[in-house]
């Protein structure tokens, strides 16, 4: 990488144009922080466009305290960010952009037209009107500290930046641009990575009561995680879908996420000692030693940049000053139902607010 580039550095380079990156750019524009967004895919928000089957459940209309209680393991780290940017503030923000919204009975929030593109277009319009430069179809290949700031390298040019925000997402759905760039950059700059695991994903079973119903969805269903002694460890009421590979849907996804975190905190245990019981229609199907689908199909990545190396009050690296993180690049994740987009928005806002405060 050529570090002898002479140019006026931009105040903030945002690497990644997904949920966290778009929100960060919007906050930067609001606070008059010169920034640029660099996105590896040809358009912004590729993964956002497919959330909730293309409908974009972008948050849940609940209090910050309830939200944090539902998030679980990462709640302490994201508490300040979420309290400063709670779900209801996000809802008000989209309303102020003229986005008509629909609230479900359980509080999940969607654009009224049921199209994720409406959310992405709202960001695009805001950033265009604010004059934020967006460089798309442009993978970043390296980030190198210099004094002061950083040199951000792409295949065709380098860019100097006073601060860098890594908002590149996780490693699931690589075709949509989530290929682990940010985690690799962080590791190259001295950060530790928590091993990746799939989060919010279906479970495999060849039980004929499931496979013969492939394609059927059961809205009023439930699932629970059961220990070897029969004790219920976790239970969730919600949608269960039957697939050719097994079970999916919100109830299954949240049980699978619970298992991943439960086992991570207990390295002596294995999934073979647990079961998932799904109740749908008139059936009660038990899946012993539940096996999740591959990571590349997961809604969210569990794992990423280690949280103890990032300041939760600023989202700034404790190792490399001026390096910030937001969203799924970090080892943070939440249940299904709008939580993960909210976490992306809230951590992005905290990072940019921290940069603004350092002026």
Image (cartoon, grey):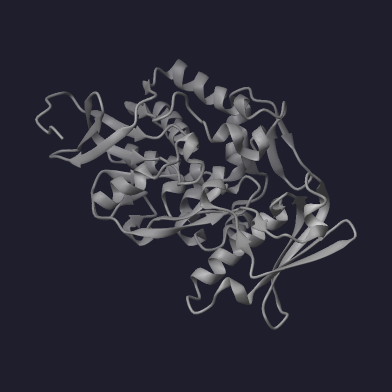
Q: Position of residue 253 (x, y in %)?
A: 65, 55
Residue 359 visible to an observer of this rendering:
no
Horizontal side, residue 110 vs residue 263: left or right? right
Horizontal side, residue 98 vs residue 243: left or right? left
Quadrant position of residue 148: top left
Which residue is pictured at 56% across the width and 62% down the height? 72
Nearest the viewer among 169 and 148 is: 169
Horizontal side, residue 275 vs residue 269: left or right? right
Nearest the viewer among 173 and 357 is: 173
Q: Position of residue 276 (x, y in %)?
A: 70, 67
Outermost residue toward the bottom in this view: 229
Outermost residue toward the right in this view: 282
Q: Name above or below for residue 33 compared with residue 182.
A: above
Q: Position of residue 32 (x, y in %)?
A: 36, 26
Nearest the viewer among 272 and 2 is: 272
Q: Position of residue 45 (x, y in %)?
A: 51, 31
Residue 66 visible to an observer of this rendering:
yes
Which residue is pictured at 41% across the width and 40% down the height? 168
Nearest the viewer among 24 and 156 is: 156
Which residue is pictured at 23% across the width and 28% down the height? 159
The quarter of the image holding the C terminus is top left
- For the image shown, how many numbered marks are present on the structure? 0
Q: Name above or below for residue 313 compared with residue 224.
A: above
The quarter of the image holding the N terminus is top left
């Amino acid at each position: 990488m050529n570090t002898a580039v002479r140019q006026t550095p931009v105040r903030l380079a945002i690497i990644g144009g997904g949920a966290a990156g778009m929100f960060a750019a919007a906050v930067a524009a609001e606070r008059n922080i010169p920034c640029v967004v660099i996105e590896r895919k040809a358009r912004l928000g590729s993964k956002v466009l497919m959330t909730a089957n293309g409908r974009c459940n972008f948050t849940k209309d609940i209090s910050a305290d309830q939200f944090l209680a539902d998030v679980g393991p990462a709640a302490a780290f994201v508490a300040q960010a979420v309290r400063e940017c709670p779900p209801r503030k996000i809802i008000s923000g989209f309303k102020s952009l003229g986005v008509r919204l629909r609230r479900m009975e359980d509080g999940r929030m969607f654009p009224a037209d049921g199209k994720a593109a409406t959310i992405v277009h709202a960001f695009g319009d805001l950033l265009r009107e604010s004059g934020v430069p967006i460089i798309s179809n442009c993978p970043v290949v390296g980030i190198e500290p210099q004094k002061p700031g950083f040199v951000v390298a792409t295949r065709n040019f380098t860019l100097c930046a006073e601060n860098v925000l890594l908002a590149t997402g996780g490693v699931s759905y690589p075709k949509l641009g989530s290929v682990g760039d940010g985690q690799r950059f962080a590791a190259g700059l001295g950060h530790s990575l928590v091993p990746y695991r799939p989060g919010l994903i279906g479970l495999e079973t060849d039980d004929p009561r499931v496979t013969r119903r492939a394609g059927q969805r059961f809205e009023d269903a439930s699932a629970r995680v059961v220990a070897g002694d029969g004790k219920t460890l976790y239970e969730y009421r919600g949608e269960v879908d039957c697939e050719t590979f097994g079970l999916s849907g919100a109830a299954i996804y949240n049980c699978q996420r619970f298992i991943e975190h439960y086992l991570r905190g207990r390295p002596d245990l294995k999934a073979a000692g647990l079961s998932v019981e799904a109740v749908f229609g008139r059936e009660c199907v038990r899946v012993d030693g539940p096996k999740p689908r591959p990571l590349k199909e997961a809604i969210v990545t569990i794992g990423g940049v280690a949280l103890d190396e990032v300041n939760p009050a600023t989202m700034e690296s404790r190792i490399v000053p001026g390096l910030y993180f937001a969203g799924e690049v970090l080892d943070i994740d939440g249940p299904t139902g709008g939580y993960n987009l909210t976490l992306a928005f809230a951590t992005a806002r905290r990072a940019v607010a921290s940069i603004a405060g350092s002026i």
